[in-house]
Image (spheres, grey):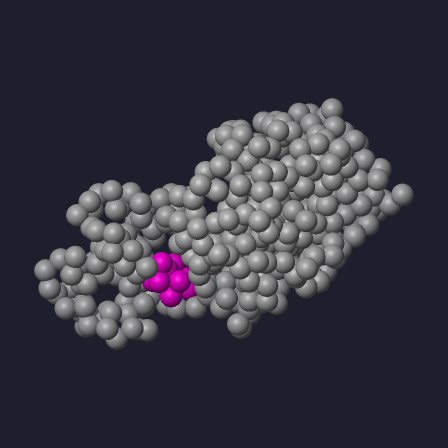
Amino acid sequence: MRPAARVQAAIELLDAVIAAACGNGPPADRLIAEGFRQRRYAGSKDRRAIRELVYGAIRACGPIPEDGRAAMLRLAEEDPALAALFDGSDYGPQPLAAGEQAAAGGLAPDWLERALADSEIEGAEATALLGRAPLDLRVNRLKADRDTLELPAPGEELAAPGALRFPPGTAVEQWDAYRGGAVEIQDHGSQLACLAVDARPGETVIDLCAGGGGKTLALAAAMDNRGTLVASDTDRQRLSQLAPRAQRAGAAIAETVLLDPRREADALSRWSGRADAVLVDAPCSGTGTWRRNPEARWRLSEAQILRYAEAQARLLDIAAGLVGPDGRLVFVTCSLLDAEGSSQVENFLARHPGWQADRPELPLGRPRGQGIRLTPYHDGTDGFFVARLRPIC
């Protein structure tokens, strides 16, 4: 494909991404994959270039653009060579019309930028949210050891035990170590959040919002496959992904429990007051994951943030009923908004005077309220808030 044709293809994909963001449709990566299936004439170099154009334009726009052309024009303002491709050539974009405007730049919609600034995410700290994330692996201690594992490419050793970092796009899914379960793809920040649980062999541990089970597998490894590990979620499809992943990883102790929304406590009643640790990796706005999903900031609203905060509070209350007298509750969100982090913990402690915060000691991160905040700028991880709570004995 000629460079101008690549730009036009990226504009068409951006149109689909923008429409999906406005209508709660599929994520960008899925739309791009579908777009390439429809453009089988595009070679691997073309697909790579088009993908980079799409994500570059998404990152360059703050508020949601009017259309894909406006988004690409925004990117072209930063790249004169790209602007020159708006020349009306065959299969390329039409020339710039009189008075035609590029989309607005910035970090996010204005209200969201203000909310992040109120949570002290601004300047270089905010800009880092739109960088490109590396690829992090967790060496699965049930099958391998970081010091002796041989991989096709050397990785950078990170602070978490078993954590390795590779450049973006490294094809680890093709490695024998990945196929055999010796390594799992998991952001370094997520691995550090699991450290805060301090899961030990023989304990009863509940992963209340397990999703596809990434953190569940890390907990199983920390427990050395000894004890009781419960993975629960309200999403049947996501929870069904755990069994094949656990088999590949050699994680033999995970028990899945499908939860009925608003009746979660009933399904987990046999563990009421008995758990040594409960992890609440709560649904959230995902503001800490924009490096991987930059269009996610176009899908948020102030009302959604409030709904997330309400759901988090309810899940924390459910988790509190599961924790034993000497147990611990670990609250995690991949959000950098205080409403989904430090304020959520303060509100929990106000509702539960018999509890206290026990800030985890992690090798990275900085204190935020009663917890720890990890950010791309300071820690090179996705953005996370991590807090640990205990009943007062």
Name the foreground residue: 54 vs 62: 54
Residue farthest right in this picture: 393
Q: Is residue 282 visible?
A: no
Residue at (45% x, 64% y) in the render: 131
Snapshot quadrant of residue 49: bottom left
- Residue 184 shown in magenta: no
Q: How many marks?
A: 0
Q: Is residue 252 visible?
A: yes
**Where residue 35 sits: x, y (%)?**
26, 46
Snapshot quadrant of residue 62: bottom left
The span shown in magenta is 55-66
Residue at (57% x, 58% y) in the render: 157
**Where residue 86 sits: x, y (%)?**
18, 67
Name the foreground residue: 40 vs 120: 40
Q: Is residue 111 left or right of residue 223?
A: left
Residue at (10% x, 60% y) in the render: 90
Residue at (42% x, 57% y) in the render: 168
Of the 4 image quadrants, the one containing the N terminus is bottom left
**Where residue 198 sits: x, y (%)?**
73, 45
